[in-house]
Amino acid sequence: MAVTTTDPTTGPATGPTTGPTTDAPAVLDDLLASRWSCRAFRPDPVPEATIDEILLAAGRSPSWCNTQPWHAHLVTGAATDRLRAAMADGIARGVYEPDVPFPPSYEGVYRDRRRVSGWQLYEALGVERGDREASGREMLRNFDLFGAPHAVVLTTTASLGTYGALDCGLFVQSFLLAAQARGVATIAQAALAGQAPVLRDLLDLPEDRQVLVGISFGYAEEEHPSASYRTERQGLDELVTRVEV
């Protein structure tokens, strides 16, 4: 039997339960399979109550020793336009300074998967291979949030290092799935972290917070060409090494 106490600002604290409902695997599988990175949003805002539900659900994510190192700055309304303008100015000034270093390169299978994903996007948009100008324009749409009416900038506490960032990855996944369950489209954007100094100034972030990722979200423009494909995933033969002896 679940024992639940609820604080309206922090959400429920739940004790032991009897387990998931019988359809839980199918629901979760469907959410994982149907979620995608949306690159075109309608301007319609998501109701505040729905956003709060998504954030509280994401806050149920596990973390090492329940440290919960994440903090989400929710950007909405006029602040979303200020965020766009600030990042556009940062790009124009050549700002590129992530708090957590980006990979210096992609090699082997990781490079191959990245290329396939990029080619799928550009093919959907009618961008020919080698057209650097067109692909560059598409990259810059990251900083326009792909037209999304809302964004979350997620930070971690620097003192927890790699494992704090790992815990925040769980928050990101939970946020994406909670949004998908409510018909809200999302895209997690590491590109925004390259504008960390801009975000730090705009959001007045404390020095001990590291910008990890942004999540743009809203309702999908489902007829946009970028919504016409889905990226590939590994099969079990690639995903798993079975150790039985």
Image: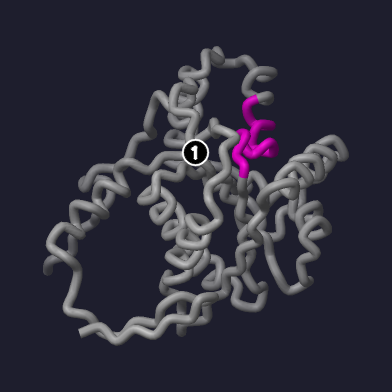
Quadrant containing the C terminus in the rendered view: bottom left
Residue farthest to the right, as pictured: 93
Q: Residue at x 64, y 39 (%)?
A: 145
Magenta highlight range: 138-149
Q: Residue at x 87, y 39 (%)?
A: 93
Where residue 86 sits: x, y (%)?
81, 44
Above or below: residue 40 compared with residue 93: above
Judged left or right of residue 131, residue 221 is: left
Where residue 33 sits: x, y (%)?
30, 43
Determine if the magenta segment contains residue 158. no
Label 1: few (<14), some or many (≥20) within 10 Å?
Answer: many
* Number of on-image labels: 1
Which amino acid does the dot numbered 1 rest on?
Tyr
Q: Residue at x 59, y 43 (%)?
A: 105
Q: Nearer the viewer, residue 99 or 14?
A: 14
**In the rendered image, which residue does mark 1 sit on?**
219
Where residue 103 sits: x, y (%)?
60, 49
Where residue 29 sits: x, y (%)?
24, 50
Above or below: residue 201 compared with residue 167: above
